Image (cartoon, rainbow, N blue to C red):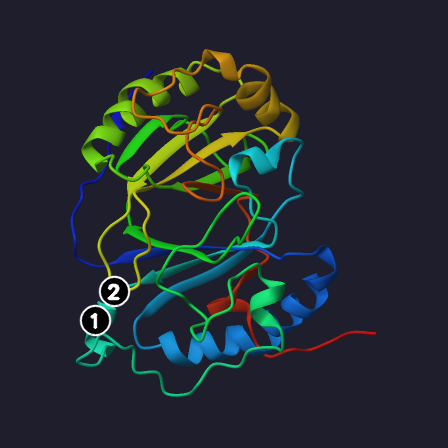
Amino acid sequence: MSQVKVGSKYMQPPYKNWIFQNVSDPAYIPKVLRWFYKDHVEDSISMTGPFCGHYSTYHALPVPLDGEDFGTYNLFMTNHLFYLDRAEYYGPQGTWIRPYCERWPENFLEMTSQPPTNEFRDPEWHGSRDGYHPFVSCYTPLMWEYDFKGSERTIDDGPNYRWVIIFKYPAGVSQEEGDEWFLHTFVPEVCEAEEVRRFLTAPCIPHFEKGPWNRVAEIWFEDSNRWHDAMVKNAARFTKPEWAQYDQFPYLEPYKDFTGIFVLDYPNSNHLRQWDGYYVTR
């Protein structure tokens, strides 16, 4: 395995924001996507325009067999790239001063697997396997910290089935202790799998809107079958950390400590370049 550290844990912008979103029932997908492309993209561009340099959304690929065991989200992933520090836009109590209130559809919290609350973006984490699957949101430096495998790939080397994971270590486990297992045990074992084409990771960084997360990683495969072969059929190859509180691989409890999504490398909408209103066709 070739391990190349390409970044560092710097705290200055630009920041990359990662967001996963889920629906509690596939029947809600038309309503949620209509809200997203009709209202939310417009609201977000209006609010983040002074400091946002990139804003794209990738629709989730179908949840693969056994995907729920890995905290898989089923709707979409959004990336923002913030070139300026958003702290300048916060009030004295840490409240983001928005020019307008955002628009939300009726029953939005229920539709998107979130707990009932007065806050649409609850700062407390309530994710669990059999309960809520709230928004996952975290910030990383713009550049990856480590490039473990696949740096020679080009866009001519075929499609990429991107498994993006955002996770935290269990209560009582420090980032240093968790990273010791992740970087020096988990990563080499994953890279040994011939199905793995690419592996990158970056640490989450402190921010006003930071959730409880420790790391973001991307592991690429050819397709869902190759992912299943590597991560499910051959899960016995992976070493359980001594601090694990969850016995099944990935040894971090799905939806509570470990979340993921499957996407392509081509976004459904690069909003700042493509969004020009909600135009329907018949």
- Work out whether residue 38 can be spotted: yes
Task: Give the quadrant of the N terminus.
Answer: top left
Quarter of the picture containing the C terminus is bottom right
Q: Considering only order in the chain, which callout, 2 or 1, is on the residue closer to the N terminus? A: 1
Q: Which tag is nearer the camera, tag 1 or tag 2?
A: 2
Q: Is residue 249 left or right of residue 278?
A: left
Disc 2 marks a residue whose amino acid type is Phe
Outermost residue, right side:
282
Mark 1 lies on a secondary structure that is helix
The disc placed on residue 135 is none
Q: Find the residue positioned furthest to the bottom.
A: 100
Q: Is residue 142 left or right of residue 102?
A: left
The residue nearer to you, when weighing 62 against 2, is: 62
Q: Amino acid at mark 1?
A: Ala
Q: Dots 1 and 2: beta carbons under 8 Å?
A: yes
Q: What is the count of numbered marks?
A: 2
Where does label 2 land, which residue? 208
Please tell me whether residue 193 is drawn above or below residue 52 in the rendered image: above
